[in-house]
Amino acid sequence: MSVGPPPKKSKTEARPSRFNVVFTGQDLERIQYPHTDAFIVTVGVANKFDVKRVLIDQGSAANIMYYELFKKLGLSEQHLTPATSPLVSFNSQTEWPLGRIALPVIAKSKVVSVDFLVVNTPSPYNAILGRPWIHQMEAVPSTYHQLVCFPTKYGVEEIRGDQVVAKHCYIAAMKAKQECDQVQMVEVPDQPVLKD
């Protein structure tokens, strides 16, 4: 027998799910194939609006709100708390958020408070819901099925992606990239060179 403090439990213990999530062939019936579409949904934000063009991104370690949506929600920078670190993209480019804000996000009957980083950069999306939201919702997203399922007190609910909107966002992003990639050619007449 040993005497001592009880063993420490880890800070986060996985809770067993109350529901099973299964994707079936029926979930594919409304899908346009083949596709590699981004997973774009509509969710409620701030108990005010249904917000379209929200990307569910399992690769994002943060929830992002773009400044245009932030303004349309009637919010101002005084509602923000300071961000403590920059966002770093997959190509190591950094972007400092304007700040953070916690807002309710409504998905069907489930509401969770989401901590968004607000950024002022161009995007075809209004917001990105990343892994923090996915985990809060205990959600299981499938880009292949264009479907996210999550448990609620009423059972498993789901939100379908919008492939048409995903294609429009892709086209908008490619157009913006082409505009940025265009090089302005300017002819400069021969200039006299100053000698030392």
Image (cartoon, rainbow, N blue to C red):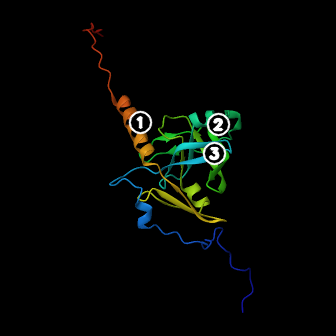
Residue 92 visible somewhere in the drawing: no
Residue 93 rendering spot, x and y as whole percentages: 45, 41
Q: Is residue 14 above or below residue 48?
A: below
Query: Label 2: few (<14), some or many (≥20) within 10 Å?
Result: some
What amino acid is labelled 3 in the image?
A: Val
What amino acid is labelled 2 in the image?
A: Leu
Q: Nearer the viewer, residue 24 or 55?
A: 24
What amino acid is labelled 1 in the image?
A: Ala
Q: Quadrant of the C terminus?
A: top left
Q: Nearer the viewer, residue 119 or 91?
A: 119
Earlier-in-chain disc, 3 versus 2? 3
Earlier-in-chain disc, 1 versus 2? 2
Q: Which of the labelled discs sits on residue 45, or is there none?
A: 3
Q: CA distance from mark 1 to mark 2?
A: 22 Å
Q: CA distance from mark 1 to mark 3?
A: 23 Å
Residue 131 rendering spot, x and y as whole percentages: 54, 56
Earlier-in-chain disc, 1 versus 3? 3
Q: Which of the labelled discs sits on residue 73, or is there none?
A: 2
Q: CA distance from mark 3 to mark 2?
A: 8 Å
Residue 66 rendering spot, x and y as whole percentages: 55, 38
Residue annotated with mark 1: 172
The residue depicted at 43 percent of the width and 40 percent of the height is 169
Please, what secondary structure does the residue beneath circle 3 have? strand
Residue 10 visible somewhere in the drawing: yes
Q: Which of the labelled discs sits on residue 110, or is there none?
A: none
The residue depicted at 29 percent of the width and 19 percent of the height is 185
Please, what secondary structure does the residue beneath circle 2 have? loop
Q: Left or right: where does residue 163 sit relative to residue 108?
A: left
**Mark 3 near mark 2, Cβ–Cβ under 8 Å?**
yes
Callout count: 3
